[in-house]
Image (cartoon, rainbow, N blue to C red):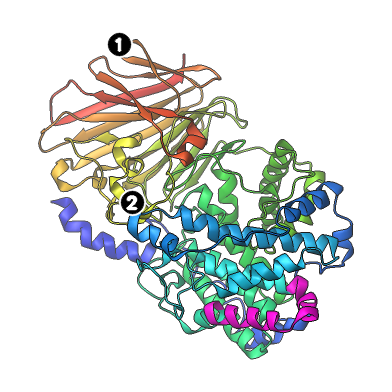
Amino acid sequence: MKKQFTAEILVLLCCMLNVTGQTGPRNLLTSSITKDNLAFALAERDEYTPTPLRGDSFWENLTPGFTQEILEDGERYLGHDWPSLLARRYMDFDIDGDRSRYGSRYHGRRHALSDLVLAEIIEDEGRFMDDIINGIWLILEETTWVVPAHSGGDKLHERNDVFVDLFSAETAALLAWTDYYLGDKFDAVTPLIRERIYDEVNRRVLQSMLDHEDFWYMGYTERIPNNWNPWIVSNWLTALLLLEEDQARRVESTWKALDVLDRYLNHHPADGGCDEGPGYWGRAAASLFDCLFLLEDATDGAVDVFDEPLVKNMGTYIYKIHIDESWFVNFADGSAINHHDPRTIFRIGRAIGDRTMMAMASERYSQLATDDRLPASRPPFGQRMIPNMQIDDDIRQFTDQYQHELFYFFPDLQVLVARESLGQEGLFMAIKGGFNDESHNHNDVGSFVVFADGKPLFIDAGVGEYTRKTFSPERYDIWTMQSAYHNLPTLNGEMQKDGREYRAENFELINTGRETGVSMDISGAWPDYAYTPVWIRSMTLDRRRGRIELVDEWQQERQLERNEWHFITAFEPEVTRKGEITISNGSSDYTLSFGRHFSREIEEVILEDRKLQRVWGDSIWRITLTTGKKGLKGKEKFIISEK
């Protein structure tokens, strides 16, 4: 059969391209500068001051709101009873899949240290130093900085472990920033503190990152890197630039960091699309920009690739899939509600010269009334929080109006975003093709979301709290990952399969001005035993008539069970008459119209997961339409319009 014949070829092709379209340019960063020029340009440790030091007028001139909040946050931890990290809590993940009991204590230590350090920078009177030293010492004494979910299935980690995960890298950067701001105060107590900081950061992170090429996220193995790559590199670079005194080692490590980032960019779709969704954009593209800001600053502009098309596209992705306020298109393991700090978006937009991105950030800034609210301060605080604090005047004074295009098309990612008007009024739709082995994948080839007046109608539920099952062979036992809980059909009783070979074909843009949409063959996302060699799905937004049309046309080789269509809604649907279901999203009433031969079932899906509840409340609903027609060929049309 067709799928059997092409599967191996598709796997090989996708390993090279990552998606069906073009990938990023080869070796963007290492081709922008030679190693010799890097050695000449890279700042030495003693001359590297990426943010204002303690005592700088910047800290004295913070708004009273900022100063008060920083001091209040720090005062919460005076005389802090630091949480213990018990072996049994580390083993929880391996035993029962829970990652929060250990994680809350682990991250709690780091948040406390971060808040204490910021408070001491502001006040500069030594009031917070005892608690800071206690926190540093506890973190330095931890057996491992690798969290249990990333430990490779070991019940306990050995001290000599050399793997660097997301949070061991973040810990290294947090300690480096602490040394950068308070190093002289530590020396006044004992030089041992700074010596231990360097020794532990070097042993656990700096040396490991320099020595190893077997960490999967680096891009030296067959596995395609994802957000781990720039996320970790941004923290590795931070710790390196702030702590390492050996200039030859600084150059060697920075050159390797450029190479590791290149291996991420080489696989990235040229259209800049993030297959991990808008939530992970903050730790994928935005972490890449953290790296680029660090590199530009540390080399006095010798490493500067902000004008590169791929880099620009990776930044602008975030506003292209923005719906309204905090709502975003959330394919893959993403939440539909995201709270990226608008200051981060503004800084990136300014760096790439994109005024629409800056306008988005300025609008979100004003909506959130952030004048006296600190930027997000999750540790490590130095890469984003402090640079973001420095641009409040700039973002407040930016006056461009934020306005979308009528559609954005990602040919490589295979996503279309289209809206009825340039503002938030009317219908909005997004639909994806792609394949079922994307990073943080859901089996969702051909799925879509629809909003009206900036509020949800047909949704992607997203993902719940991560557990051991989430990233295991049991991943697709979780209902949020399954095609039957996306806006997709079930063919001959079968859901879509996971794997790189299960994909859309012939993904094409339809755009006449009046209508914008896509067409694709999604039959390849199902296994052979669904007996469906052709399933053409087209979806168009008709602006003149103010409606969305979804058309499925298919051919099947056998009919074992009746085909079903699933529609996931954020609000309870109401059957108003045969062939019509009405949904009110709090703005207006909208109808889903379909053939009168369909039988229908409306199921309330009770949400017990806290992460899902924060977005959708206690329930979402699944509409299942079952065709009453027989035959191996067919065509059905579904219309979404205001009632």
Depth order, front residue of 109/638: 109
Which dot marks residue 435? 2
For residue 186, what is the image quadrant? bottom right
- The overriding secondary structure of the stretch rendered in magenta is helix
462, 189: nearer the viewer: 189
Residue 173 horizontal/vertical position (percent) = 63, 70
Answer whether residue 295 is visible to the viewer in this image: no
Mark 1 or mark 2: whose residue is earlier in sequence: 2
Q: Residue at x 36, y 47 (%)?
A: 442
Q: Are marks 1 and 2 in contact (CB under 8 Å)?
A: no
Q: Is residue 473 magenta?
A: no
Helix, strand or loop at label 2? It is: strand
Q: Is residue 115 left or right of residue 405?
A: right
- Residue under label 1: 578
Question: What is the magenta range?
Answer: 180-205
Q: Position of residue 399 (x, y in %)?
A: 79, 41
